[in-house]
Image (cartoon, grey):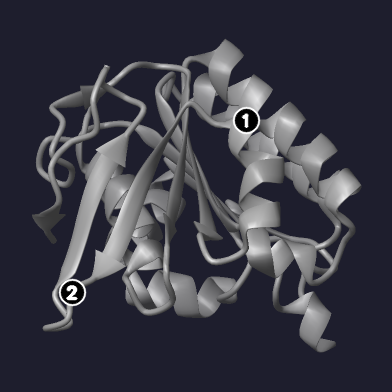
C-alpha cells in the first residue's frame, strides 16, 4: 500500500493504481503531484519523474527531496524540456534527456529503464509520472499519446507502482479520451476566496469531501 494520508483525505492507495490529478489552472496540480512523490521518497519508495514543463535543473532546485533521490539512486528524472529548447545535454547519473515532450517512444524507453534500475536498487515500490497530458498534446497527436499512456499505465499496474498524471478538466474531449486509462482522480479547485481544495474520486466507493491543501 502507498501511504498518502498526510497529503490526501484517504489513508492509502492500492499498488498498481494510476491517478489523474485534474483541475483548473493555478489550482496547484503540479505541486500536489510533486508532494506525493516527495512523501514517497521520504517513506522509502522510488520515483520516476517525467518532467514535461520544467527542465531537470529547475525541478531539482525546487525539490530537494527529488534532488536527494537522484543523488542516491532512488529517483530518476526524464527531462523533456532542455533539448526541446535547443540546448545540448548529455545523460548523467539518474537524469535522462529526450528531444521534446512529444518524443513518447524515447520517454517510454527511459521510463522502463528507470523502473528496472530502481528495482535493482531495492526500490520495489515506485511513484512515477508527473507528466502533463496537455503539454504533451502540444507536441504529439492524441493517438500516439494514448498508446504511450496505455503502455505506461500498464507497467504501473503490473509492477505494483503508483502512477500520476496531470490534466486540465476544462477540455472535456481530452478528459474523456484519456480518463479510461486511469483508476481514479484527484480533483482540485479554487474557491471564491482562492483557497485550494481537493477531493479524491474513484479510490473509495464514494468521493471524499473537498478539503483544503
Residue at 38% x, 77% y is 61
| Image label count | 2
Q: Is residue 40 left or right of residue 70?
A: left
Q: Position of residue 180 (x, y in %)?
A: 62, 30
Q: Position of residue 136 (x, y in %)?
A: 73, 63
Q: Give SS at disc 2.
A: loop
Quarter of the picture holding the C terminus: bottom left
Relative depth, front residue between 199 and 127 = 199
Q: Which residue is mark 2?
A: 191
Quarter of the picture holding the N terminus: top left
Residue at 63% x, 30% y is 181
Q: Is residue 90 left or right of residue 205?
A: right
Spatial separation of the CA atoms under disc 1 and disc 2: 28 Å
Give the class, few, some or many, for how many residues have Cα within 10 Å of label 2's Cα (few <14, many ≥20).
Answer: few
**Residue 36 makes an appearance in the image:** yes
Q: Is residue 124 left or right of residue 92?
A: left
Relative depth, front residue between 42 and 52 = 52
Sequence-wise, the earlier of marks 1 and 2 is 1
Vertical relation: 120 (above or below) 24: above
Q: Which residue is mark 1?
A: 180
Vertical relation: 64 (above or below) 20: below
Q: Position of residue 138 (x, y in %)?
A: 79, 72
Amino acid at each position: 500500500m502507498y501511504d498518502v494520508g498526510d497529503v490526501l483525505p484517504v489513508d492509502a492507495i492500492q499498488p498498481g493504481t494510476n491517478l489523474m490529478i485534474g483541475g483548473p489552472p493555478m489550482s496547484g496540480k503540479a505541486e500536489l503531484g510533486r508532494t506525493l512523490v516527495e512523501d514517497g521518497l521520504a517513506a522509502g519508495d522510488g520515483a520516476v519523474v517525467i518532467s514535461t514543463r520544467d527542465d531537470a535543473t529547475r525541478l531539482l532546485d525546487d525539490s530537494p527531496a527529488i534532488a536527494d533521490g537522484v543523488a542516491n539512486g532512488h529517483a530518476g528524472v526524464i527531462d523533456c524540456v532542455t533539448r526541446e529548447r535547443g540546448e545540448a545535454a548529455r545523460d548523467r547519473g539518474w537524469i535522462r534527456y529526450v528531444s521534446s515532450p512529444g518524443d513518447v517512444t524515447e520517454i517510454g524507453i527511459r521510463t522502463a529503464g528507470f523502473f528496472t534500475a530502481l528495482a535493482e536498487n531495492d526500490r520495489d515500490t515506485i511513484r512515477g509520472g508527473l507528466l502533463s497530458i496537455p503539454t504533451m498534446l502540444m507536441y504529439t497527436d492524441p493517438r500516439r499519446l494514448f498508446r504511450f499512456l496505455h503502455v505506461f499505465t500498464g507497467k504501473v499496474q503490473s509492477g505494483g507502482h503508483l502512477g500520476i498524471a496531470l490534466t486540465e478538466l476544462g477540455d472535456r474531449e481530452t478528459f474523456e479520451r484519456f480518463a479510461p486509462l486511469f483508476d481514479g482522480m484527484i480533483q482540485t479547485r479554487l474557491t471564491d476566496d482562492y483557497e485550494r481544495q481537493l477531493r479524491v474520486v474513484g479510490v473509495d466507493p464514494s468521493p471524499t469531501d473537498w478539503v483544503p491543501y
